[in-house]
Amino acid sequence: MATRDEASDQRTRILIVDDHPIVREGLAEVLSREPDLVVCGEAGDPRAALEALAACRPDAAIVDLSLGGASGLDLVRDIKARYPEVAVLVLTMHDEALYAERALRAGARGYIMKREAAQSVVGALRRVLGGAIYVSEQLTGSMLGQFIGGHHAAPASPVGSLSDRELHVFELIGQGLGTRGIAGQLHISVKTVEAHRAHIKGKLQLKDATELLQHATLWLREEGEA
C-alpha cells in the first residue's frame, strides 16, 4: 500500500486498487489533472486496499476485478459492508456482459472497461460520486430491456451461468492452479473446491478435468485478448 499526500481536505478523495503499478500510476496521473480530485491512496491487493480504506477514508474507490488471483468482487462486497458510504467504480478488462451485473450486485455503483478513454473514466467516476449508477449505453439498454420484459436474459455464453465463486474458481483453473492451490488461494477446503469443479463441469457440459482445464485456459486467453 502507498499513501499519498493528503494536503487538501476540500478535494474529493480517491483510492486506486489495481495489481499493476503502471496502471495505478497512469490513473493517478489522469486524476491529478482534475482540480477537485486527489488520490489519497493506492493498493495492489484486497488486504492493502482495506488498510488504505481505513487510513485515508476515501470518498470513492476505483477497483479492478483481477487482483493477483484474488477476487475483486469479494473486495467490492467487503467495501460495501464496511464502508457503505464509499462509491465503488469497477475499472477492468473483464467483459461487462459477464461481470458488470455481478459487480453491481456486489455493491459497485459503476462499471467501465479499461479500453475506454481516460476522460470517460473520469466521467464515470463523477457519475458514481454524484450518486448515480454508471454502465455503458449498450449495457444500460440491455438491462432496461430485461426490466421492461420482466425477466432476465439468458447468459450470452455458458460461462455466464456460473455463480460468482464458480467463475472465480474457473478463472484460477485457467491460470493453471490445481485443486490444492485454489483451496489455499480462496481459504476454503479442497472438498469445497472439488464441489465447485464438479458444478462447473456440469454447467459447461465438460467430460473431465482435462476438458475443464483446456476450456478454462482458452476462455482466460480470450478474455485477455478482448
Image (tube, rainbow, N blue to C red):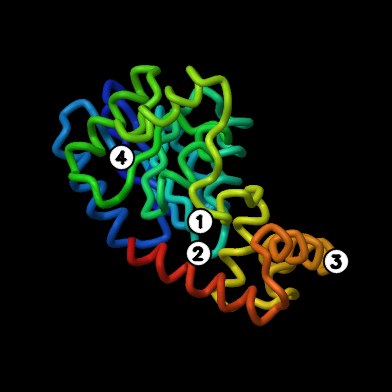
Q: Nearer the viewer, residue 37 or 196?
A: 196
Residue assigned mark 2: 68
Q: Check the image and report above or below for 180 versus 44.
A: below
> Which residue occupies 61% across, 71% down?
173
Q: Residues within 10 Å of mark 2 (few under 14, many from 20)?
A: few
Query: How far separated are the C-alphas under marks 4 and 2?
Result: 22 Å
Residue assigned mark 4: 39
Q: Check the image and report above or below for 98 versus 223.
A: above
Residue assigned mark 1: 45
For discs 4 and 3, the disc positioned in front in the rendered view:
3
Q: Nearer the viewer, residue 22 or 114?
A: 114
In the rendered structure, find residue 191 and report the number of the disc placed on it.
3
> Which residue occupies 34% across, 31% down?
13
Q: Residues within 10 Å of mark 1 (few under 14, many from 20)?
A: many
Query: How far separated are the C-alphas under marks 1 and 2?
Result: 7 Å
Q: Position of residue 19 (x, y in %)?
A: 42, 60
Contact between labelled residues 4 and 1, with CB atoms less than 8 Å apart: no
What's under tag 1, amino acid-wise?
A: Asp
Q: Nearer the viewer, residue 136 or 183?
A: 136
Q: Residues within 10 Å of mark 4 (few under 14, many from 20)?
A: many
The reply, left or right, for residue 26 in relation to residue 82 is left
Asked where in the image residue 213 lies, by quadrant, the reply is bottom right
